[in-house]
Amino acid sequence: MNYAIPKTMAFLTLSAGIVSCSQNAEEASRPNIILIMSDDAGYSDVGCFGSEISTPNIDKLGYEGIRFSRFYSGAKCEPSRSSLFTGLYQGGERAVNLVKILRDQGYYTVHAGKEHFMSWVPESVYAAKVNDQSLTFWATTEYFEPPSGEFVRPFILNGKEVGIDQIYHEKKPFHKEDAATDNAIRWLDKPISRHQPFFLFLGYHAPHYPLQARPEDIEKYRGKYLMGWDRIREERFARQKELGLIPEWVELSPPSSNACNTPFRFFKQFGHEGGALVHALMWWPSMIEAGSINDVDEWEMYDLYEDPDEMNSIYGDPAYSEIQAMLHKRLEELRRQHGDSDELTQGFLQDYLNNRN
């Protein structure tokens, strides 16, 4: 089958680490990979990006690796995840999950946590189709077992619908985030014992509604936010400058009812910086200098601008690559006329809207 294989992949939100456990040259060529994606976690919601929230393990990875201060998502979890796994903004039956590529190369693959794709993503991309082990739920469901015992959406264990009595979990009562972690750790015993490289995807959901946490976690932060969102934003903003994530000359955006995406405007679902810009980090001791911050390049889950021919390879229609070349040309014309301005943005977006169909 002729797959549209992604040529550029990066990592998204909460924390995304490449973890290498390699001990020799042969293993170093195929490092173990752990990719973590968290729904609705804001740009400033972890400590190493300025938060007051305690995230010591994520912070360790960030401070010992590289933090990306200009990393863009699809503004919502569904399109972001679709691009993350396929490398495409839109595709179809030719789309392939990056996990399949790794598995074909001898990786042991595990998916633990949320799964949710756009309608254009074929079922061949789904976790149960491409992983050695998988525990998923679709879109959103309760964190704890409901009084009725029936979840809004069921859990899927290796392709089969199951109840929580069939899901391994160490702590009572059942909580889906802990269960995802418990199963992921247990499943990694097999490849580690066989000295087989592994890929682990952890799809956490905790910042996403219905926002259900254990009582001890709620108690830990009781009263902390009574000062109000504006004060929280100011304190996060100050820490971001101290951490070197935000230049000293940058000013805090106007007051907002949401502090998670400090210092930007708006939040998830909006196309503004606050909706699309997310924190991202990578940890790979043998390859990445500790304490690095990438604040120059803009990263996204898939960058068509870097590969003008990629639309053609995705869709199999030369018209798409011609349209993209035209848009690039038009963008350069607008830049010469207006520089980086609102007129430039509006002109380019209008061109895009006129040609996208």
Image (cartoon, rainbow, N blue to C red):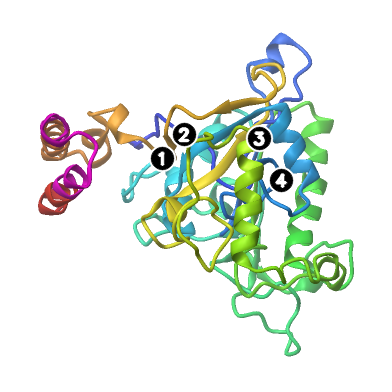
User: From what the image shows, is residue 118 above or below residue 18?
Assistant: below
Whether pointer 4 and pointer 3 mark residues with C-beta atoms closer than 8 Å, the reply is no
Describe the element under mark 2 as helix, strand or loop: loop
Residue type of the residue flagged with mark 3: Leu
Q: CA distance from mark 3 to mark 2?
A: 27 Å
Describe the element under mark 1 as helix, strand or loop: loop
Residue pointed to by mark 4: 47
* Mark with earlier residue (1, 3): 1
x%, y% of residue 354?
Answer: 10, 53
Tell me the number on the disc at residue 87. Answer: 1
Query: Does the stretch in magenta take in 191?
Result: no
Residue type of the residue flagged with mark 1: Gly
State the quadrant of the N terminus.
Answer: top left
Can residue 139 be seen in the rendering of this structure? yes
Q: CA distance from mark 1 to mark 3?
A: 31 Å
Q: Nearer the viewer, mark 3 or mark 2?
A: 3
x%, y% of residue 168?
Answer: 82, 61
Residue type of the residue flagged with mark 2: Met
Residue pointed to by mark 3: 243
Q: CA distance from mark 4 to mark 1?
A: 29 Å
* Mark with earlier residue (4, 3): 4
Q: Nearer the viewer, mark 1 or mark 3?
A: 3
* Mark 3, other Cα within 10 Å: few <14 / some 14–19 / many ≥20: some
Describe the element under mark 4 as helix, strand or loop: helix
* Mark with earlier residue (2, 1): 2
Q: Main secondary structure of the magenta part?
A: helix
Residue pointed to by mark 2: 9
| Segment colored magenta | 331-348
Describe the element under mark 3 as helix, strand or loop: loop
